Structures are given as structure tokens and as C-alpha cells.
Image (spheres, rainbow, N blue to C red):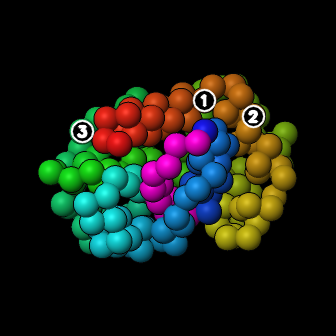
Amino acid sequence: MTKHFELIPEDGAIQALLKTPGYPKTVLGDGIGNTMNKLIKQYHNKFAIALIDDDKVKPKHVDLFTRLLEDTDHLQLWQKPESRHFIILIKPAIEDWLLNQAVLCDIDPSKFGFANLDGLKRVTKNPVEVHKNQAFQQFLHHLFQKNAPGFIQTEEWIEQLYDKYL
């Protein structure tokens, strides 16, 4: 994948998710509030996609966006009207979403060391571990190889937006 555009993942777990299908260049948002601030303030008039998960507290700027699409794989696509700014919202939080994707693909997360949600969170919430933990990387890769519906939809939306706005 050689296309260049700005993908702004909220955290390391979403950044690792994006690297799985081959999106190596991302600008880490470092939290949902910072992600939204980067999207709005640093990419004025530029094409950019923020990837965030559904948090209990909605950050500033989210109300500027309009929902375009909702997918059955717990994803929503939002756009700031009259701009090239987009949000892919993962619902619910990334850890629950990943476990749901595993169920849809008949993958047992415990084979990768994630017997429960807390075990997965220990990796995803650690900014260093999320990129170095081989079991987590293998888990993501296995989901991708099994064509997890949410992975496919995320990639399709990114590619469609790229084709339309660049």
C-alpha cells in the first residue's frame, strides 16, 4: 500500500489495527480529545481520517460531524460537512470490538493469551506493549487473514474515501 493520506488513530491499539492491512504511516492521536483536535486544527483543508472508539465522554468537535453510514459490524462513518475530514467510529471500545470480531470469525482469543477482556486491555492500554506484544500482533493478523468483517469494512471505507477525495 503506497497511498499517502493522513490516518489519525486515537491510540496504539487502533494504530496497530491499521498496520495490519498495510497502512504504515499514521499520526497517533494520543487520546480521543487530542485526535479530534489534530483532525480539526492541524489538517485544515486537507484530507484526513480519524479512527476513534466509542468513549463514554464525547470530545469537543464531535458535534461538528454528521453520520454518513452505520455498518452492522459496529462501525460508523462520519464527516464534517463541507470538508475532507472524516471519522471512523468503532463501537464499542476497541477491545470489545476486537473480541466481537474474533467471535464473528470463530477465533478463540485465548489461543493468543487473551482469555478475557482484562487480559486484552493489559496490552491495548499500554502504549509500548501494544506494538511489541507478538501475541497481540498475531491476533490482529489472524483476524485480518480470516477476513474479519469490521477489518474489511474499515479498509473499504478508507479506500473509498481516498479514491473520492484525493
SS assignment at label 1: loop
- Looking at the figure, which quarter contains the C terminus? top left
Answer left or right for 65 relative to 128: left
Based on the displayed image, in which of its 4 quarters is residue 2 positioned?
A: top right
146 above or below 141?
A: above
Q: Which residue is mark 3?
A: 68
- The 10 Å Cα crowd at callout 3, few under 14, some 14 to 19, many 20 or more, is few
Q: What number is the disc on residue 148?
A: 1
Q: Position of residue 27 (x, y in %)?
A: 52, 64
Q: Is residue 17 visible?
A: no
- The 10 Å Cα crowd at callout 1, few under 14, some 14 to 19, many 20 or more, is many
* First reached walking from the N terminus: tag 1 or tag 2: 2
Q: Say whether residue 4 is magenta.
A: yes
**Residue type, label 2:** His
Q: What number is the disc on residue 93?
A: none
Q: Position of residue 30 (x, y in %)?
A: 52, 72
Q: Position of residue 72 (x, y in %)?
A: 40, 29
Q: Say whether residue 6 is magenta.
A: yes
69 above or below 84?
A: above
Q: Residue at x 48, y 37 (%)?
A: 154
**Residue type, label 3:** Leu
Q: Which residue is mark 2?
A: 142
* First reached walking from the N terminus: tag 3 or tag 2: 3
- Looking at the figure, which quarter contains the N terminus? top right
Extent of the magenta region = 2-11
SS assignment at label 2: helix
* First reached walking from the N terminus: tag 3 or tag 1: 3
**Residue type, label 1:** Ala
Answer left or right for 101 relative to 80: right
Q: Residue at x 30, y 73 (%)?
A: 41
Q: Residue at x 58, y 56 (%)?
A: 25
